Amino acid sequence: MKPRVVLLMVLGIILGPVYYGYCVYFSGRGGETIAMSDRAERWVAPDGAILRFTGGLGYKPVSLALAPEMNRVSLRLGFELPAQSQAVELQYQATLFEREHALLQRPIRVALAPGRAQSADIGPLEIPYAGDYLFVLEEVGRFTAVPGVSLLVVEKVQAPNMPVVWTGLTLLVVALVIQLHALWTAQAGRPGRRP
């Protein structure tokens, strides 16, 4: 492989997937980790509303004090099965309420192995104004194994500069085209082959 192709690939990987992954998954700072352990078919929200979960169980709703100064905010859920459990695939529905309005709603699917932790990020999202928001995590279906679940609010998550990401992906495509062309030319130039 020619040095210029290697250089294009390295630059493409750094400016594309690495930069994007850093912004979305590793930037920002986390606060307190909240353990979510209590599950029931219904809960009373802090405002007195009753939340019912007909398809499964819901974790006890968590009240979060969020403000625009924290933008962009990501909610990171951590899952861990006890070591004696069997591997499972679980589904959840995560919702962040701004009063009675669902500000963010996202399905989550996690494949868990015993004794191994896995995380799922919800967001990032922009908080419109300061206040108490309600986070609700609902099981989809009845679970045979119940993992330990934790919630971490990550603030100041960087937004990736998409022109930089697209430039990186373009460099990767150019490097791939150059490499494929070089392979095709070398294959066509072998004795016994037609050009």
Image (cartoon, rainbow, N blue to C red):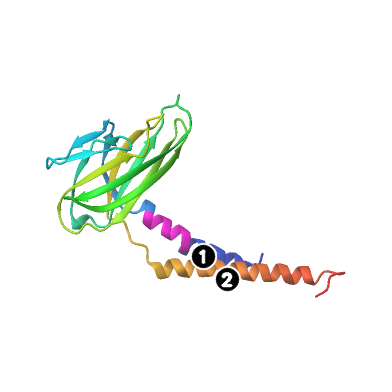
SS for callout 2: helix
Labels 1 & 2 near each other (Cβ < 8 A):
yes
SS for callout 1: helix
In the rendered image, residue 151, in percent from the top left (x then y), is placed at 29, 41
In the rendered image, residue 84, in percent from the top left (x then y), is placed at 45, 24
- The disc labelled 1 sits on which kind of residue? Gly
Which quarter of the figure has residue 183? bottom right
Residue under pointer 2: 174
Q: In which quarter of the image is the C terminus?
A: bottom right
Depth check: give the residue in front, 113 or 156. Answer: 113
Name the residue located 16 percent from the left edge and 57 percent from the top edge.
129
Name the residue located 18 percent from the left edge and 54 percent from the top edge.
67
Where 15 sits versus 70, above or below? below
Left of 178 or right of it: where is 64? Answer: left
Residue 71 is covered by the magenta coloring = no
Residue under pointer 1: 12
Give the magenta range. 16-24
